[in-house]
Amino acid sequence: MLAFRLDKRHGATAVVTQGANPGLASVLVKQALMNMARDQHFEVERPACYEDWAKLAQRLQIKVIHIAERDTQVSKRRKARDEFVNTWSVDGFVSEGLQPAELGWGSHEKHWPADAARHGYGCDAAIYLKRPGIATRVRSWTPLEGPYHGFLVTHAESISIADHLTLRENNEVVYRPTVHYAYHPCDDAVLSLHEVAGKNWKQQNQQRIIGQDIASGTDELGVLLMGNAKGAYWFGSRLSIEQARELAPHNSATSLQVVAGILGGMAWALRNPDCGVVEPDDIDDQLVMEIAAPYLGDLVGVYGDWTPLKERSGLFDEPLDQDDPWQFLNFRVT
């Protein structure tokens, strides 16, 4: 789609990959950068182009960005054998999860993964690992959950955010953060993935998307920006099932976060009908946030002292870079 648009900058607007993530994730990153700049008393105007956003991220010393999500929603009925349970599309999750794990590859990285490769086309902001995303886990952190292991599932925002926060000099990349998803789905979905893996990646015969039968839980969806001296900064949506049902009946927390992003994209497209093919990073993040925010529950920003090296067990030897906690080597669960 991005290649298709190169000589077609006008025509009917098509906002691609616009939901919660991809979609709102790009908005949350921009707002998080502005929040951090404010907290550190930077005198900075809101960036108007990709290069200015990248310069701000570089100035804030952002080395890594996780789309850090922990879904704690739980059904009144537990997962059965030969059943995949999820809070959103089962087919969609399994499909993307079986694709190779992809991540935006930062300019600070010193340790090339043994199972990594480059695509050989496109913007070259990303690499991929020769293994499924749902077989690849990374360490991450959210304020409510604390540290956790998430799945590095391929997502468009991992590439687009990394690409849009790239600085080049003489055609050489001088700054780019590492960007990827770190997803811990609801507990029954984790059990479902474990079952899929045990069947050599064969999907179960039954599937159930939980909604009205959710008894409790929250989808804590945000972006975690790391590398700044003030600490890791998580900014995002905390939406409980109770809040979601009050805001829009028949939704789960997960579905409403997605729909909020879609609604924001639709509002922008209606006001800008002749922009051709665009990504979430191309559109007015402030307008999208204005439209989406009433449906996102609590929008919060929290600093923490977490790093992937914090409180690591000394019982077993493992490859680590003690000099730079923000190396992908330290995040990856081996």
Image: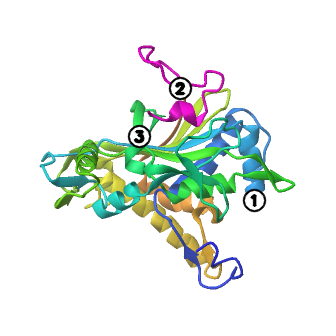
Which of discs 1 and 3 lies nearer the camera? The answer is 3
Count of marks placed on residues: 3
Q: Is residue 332 magenta?
A: yes
Q: Which residues are magenta?
A: 307-334
Q: Which amino acid is tagged 2?
A: Pro
Q: Point out residue 23 in the picture as x, y percentages from the top left corner.
A: 52, 60
Q: Is residue 214 left or right of residue 68?
A: left
The residue where tag 2 is placed is 319
Q: Is residue 232 above or below residue 311?
A: below
Residue at point 64%, 74% (across, down): 3
Q: Is residue 193 magenta?
A: no
The residue where tag 1 is placed is 49
**What is the secondary structure assignment of the residue under circle 1?**
loop
Q: Is residue 194 above or below residue 94?
A: above
Which of discs 2 and 1 lies nearer the camera? The answer is 2
Q: Disc 1 or 3, which lies upstream in sequence?
A: 1
Cα separation, mark 1 vs mark 3, equals: 32 Å
Dominant secondary-structure state across the stretch colored magenta = loop
Label 2 neighbour load within 10 Å: few <14, some 14-19, many 20+: few
**Residue lying furthest top:** 314
The residue where tag 3 is placed is 150
Residue at point 22%, 51% (across, down): 199
Question: Depth check: 279 or 91 in front?
Answer: 91
Res 237 seen here: no
Give the image quarter of residue 73: top left
Q: Is residue 31 left or right of residue 101?
A: right
Give the image quarter of residue 39: top right
Label 1 neighbour load within 10 Å: few <14, some 14-19, many 20+: few
Q: Which amino acid is tagged 1?
A: Cys
